[in-house]
Amino acid sequence: MKSVFRILPAAGIVLAVGAVLASASPAAAQAQGQPPALKPASAACMAGARDILGMKNAAAMYANAVPGIVQQTKQTLLQANLNYQKDLDEVAVVVAQTYAGKEKEIGEKMAQIYCNEFTDAEIASLVTFYKSTIGQKLLAAEPKAIQMSMGAMNQWAAEFSDTVTAQFRAEMRKRGKQI
């Protein structure tokens, strides 16, 4: 089953999860860069939230988080230590193996966030909805709709950018300056 999360690039995963976490935290916690304070979630809520995330194939969104972070860290270290490229390549494999599966913590945090935003009853209703015919249709059609919407937004932005550029040029001409 397709999911909206499959169209998100792996690099955006950490940013997207970070944005979700930051938007859920109180202002004081945000100012200090602390994770949000989440209310304790019941086992039923967590199970339902995991079910919803599974139906949305959310794991695809963060599946490559560990290898991506390992690769990014290796590249950062390599910039200052070019003579250690072979060693860093070898260490990257070890580190990636050591932390394989750690990305599942993202899914648990996402489930907690769902439980923070929805009551147990609402989670149960959402599970029922997503298992319904229309819910299944939404899960199947939403990625395409989002992808098409993004394409439409990009096209609009490109066309509007030309309009704005033309307006800038016109205003600058009024000032006697050609750009």
Image (cartoon, helix red, strand yellow):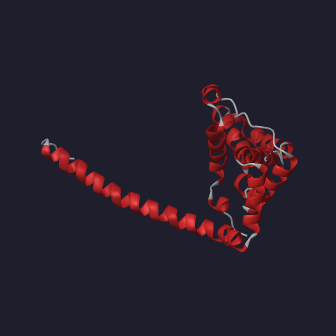
34 in relation to 116, above or below: above
**Which residue is farthest front?**
121
Q: Position of residue 14 (x, y in %)?
A: 67, 45
Q: Position of residue 97 (x, y in %)?
A: 85, 46
Q: Is 9 left or right of 101, judged from the image as shown?
A: left
Q: Position of residue 18 (x, y in %)?
A: 65, 41
Quarter residue 166 falls in: bottom left
Quarter residue 31 falls in: top right
Residue 13 shows in the view: yes
21 in relation to 163, above or below: above
150 in relation to 141, above or below: above
Q: Quadrant of the N terminus?
A: bottom right
Q: Is 77 left or right of 31, judged from the image as shown?
A: right
Residue 178 shows in the view: no
The residue sitting at 68% across, 32% down in the picture is 81
Q: Nearer the viewer, residue 96 or 5?
A: 5
